[in-house]
Image (spheres, helix red, strand yellow):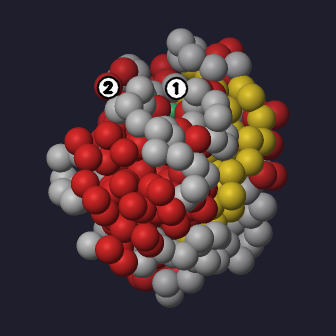
């Protein structure tokens, strides 16, 4: 396999000039220009020649070159049509990359995995466009794409939210959703000067190792997430009021009160103090009473 040639400022600038490329802010385009960070991401993703990797937003193909050198096969999904000729150029030496010009949020990823990897679990690796971090990650989990791990660069604050437990201000619906599906681990913090152009926020690489089985058993997954969202929608309210006021839930007052009482934490508890296990218990109690 050829060695990656991108990943430093000089070669990045050269390619951008060659194609007269102008960055599109609306697509969250901040390209990596630091080889140490790229090496860290590839190491954290534990990629081998047996792996099929999906990369979201390859940009000019910087990380794609590293992925192609390490993996068996790579599918790189890029929304910006003006990057496609650049990718065809920067990835021309690799015969194991499939460039797909599509919006990742509209792509049938399950079908892609079925066709290109026989439905076997894949690894997702990306320097994500920050404006759609949550829909991308939740979309992957909720559509039950067979996944082994998701190793991604995200805004530092978002990485923190994914990793924390109850009792902190960062704890919320995203923490619980991510932890229901995966085990999060922050691999590295990455400063703005590792990107071109520099983002206004700090970044972090997070690895989500997907659970083979969820750590809690719930009878109704949709209800669990509806309860979690309702609990954090009105953070200042008690859990009971949050659930009573939730538009889509439509639960009888007595069911809510009895189920909260069964948690044994008092009627005035707030949702932000509950662990994933406690949310699961609450969900199952509600399910039995409905
Ligand atoms: N991987 C490159 C790198 O590390 O240098 C670029 C990362 S840049 C932060 C995000 C990339 O995602 C851009 O290339 C952008 O055009 C692309 N992108 C933005 N929205 C997208 C979407 N909905 N579907 C697919 N790609 C998208």
The reply, left or right, for residue 56 in relation to residue 277 is: left
Residue lying at 34% horizontally and 57% vertically, measured from the top left: 256
User: Which residue is located at x 31 percent, y 48 percent?
Assistant: 243
Q: Callout 2: few (<14), some (14-19), or many (20+) C-alpha neighbours within 10 Å?
A: few
Q: CA distance from mark 1 to mark 2?
A: 11 Å
Where is residue 235 drawn, in percent x and y? 42, 31
The residue where tag 1 is placed is 30
* Residue 288 in view (yes/no): yes
Q: Secondary structure at mark 1?
A: loop
Quadrant observed for ligand 1 in the rendered image: top left
Q: Residue at x 54, y 58 (%)?
A: 263
**Residue 128 seen in this snapshot:** no
Vertical arrangement, residue 99 with respect to residue 126, above or below = below
**Farthest residue in the bottom direction?**
118
**Is 24 drawn above or below residue 40 in the view shown?**
above
Q: Position of residue 220 (x, y in %)?
A: 38, 74
Q: Is mark 2 within 8 Å of ligand 1?
A: no
Q: Circle 1: is it few (<14), some (14-19), or many (20+) Cα within 10 Å?
A: many
Residue located 28% across and 59% down the image: 254
> Based on the displayed image, in which of its 4 quarters is residue 14 positioned?
top right
Residue 87 image position (x, y, % from top left): 48, 45
Q: Which residue is mark 2?
A: 26
Query: Foreground: 274 or 98?
Result: 274
- SS state under label 2: helix
Q: Is mark 1 within 8 Å of ligand 1?
A: yes
Image coordinates of residue 29 in percent, x first then y, are 45, 28
Splitting the image into 4 quarters, where does residue 51 fall?
A: bottom right
């Amino acid at each position: 396999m050829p060695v990656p040639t991108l990943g430093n400022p000089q070669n990045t600038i050269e390619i951008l000039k060659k194609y007269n490329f102008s960055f599109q802010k609306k697509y969250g385009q901040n390209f990596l220009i630091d080889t140490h960070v790229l090496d860290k991401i590839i190491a954290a993703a534990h990629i081998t020649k047996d792996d099929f990797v999906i990369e979201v937003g390859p940009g000019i193909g910087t990380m794609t070159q590293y992925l192609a050198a390490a993996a068996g096969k790579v599918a790189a999904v890029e929304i910006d049509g003006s990057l496609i000729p650049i990718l065809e150029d920067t990835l021309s030496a690799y015969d194991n990359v499939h460039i797909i010009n599509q919006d990742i949020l509209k792509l049938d990823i399950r079908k892609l995995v079925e066709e290109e990897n026989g439905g076997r679990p894949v690894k997702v690796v990306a320097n994500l466009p920050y404006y759609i971090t949550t829909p991308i990650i939740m979309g992957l989990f909720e559509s039950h794409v067979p996944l082994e791990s998701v190793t991604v660069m995200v805004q530092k604050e978002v990485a923190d939210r994914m990793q924390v437990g109850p009792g902190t201000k960062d704890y919320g619906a995203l923490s619980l959703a991510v932890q229901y599906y995966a085990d999060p681990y922050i691999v590295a913090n990455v400063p703005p000067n590792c990107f071109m152009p520099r983002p206004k926020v700090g970044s972090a690489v997070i690895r989500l190792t997907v659970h083979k089985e969820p750590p809690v058993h719930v009878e109704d997954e949709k209800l669990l997430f509806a309860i979690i969202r309702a609990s954090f929608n009105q953070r200042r309210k008690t859990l009971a009021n949050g659930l009573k006021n939730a538009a889509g839930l439509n639960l009888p007052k007595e069911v809510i009160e009895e189920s909260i009482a069964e948690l044994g934490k008092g009627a005035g508890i707030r949702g932000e103090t509950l662990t994933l296990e406690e949310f699961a218990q609450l969900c199952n109690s509600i399910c039995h009473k409905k």
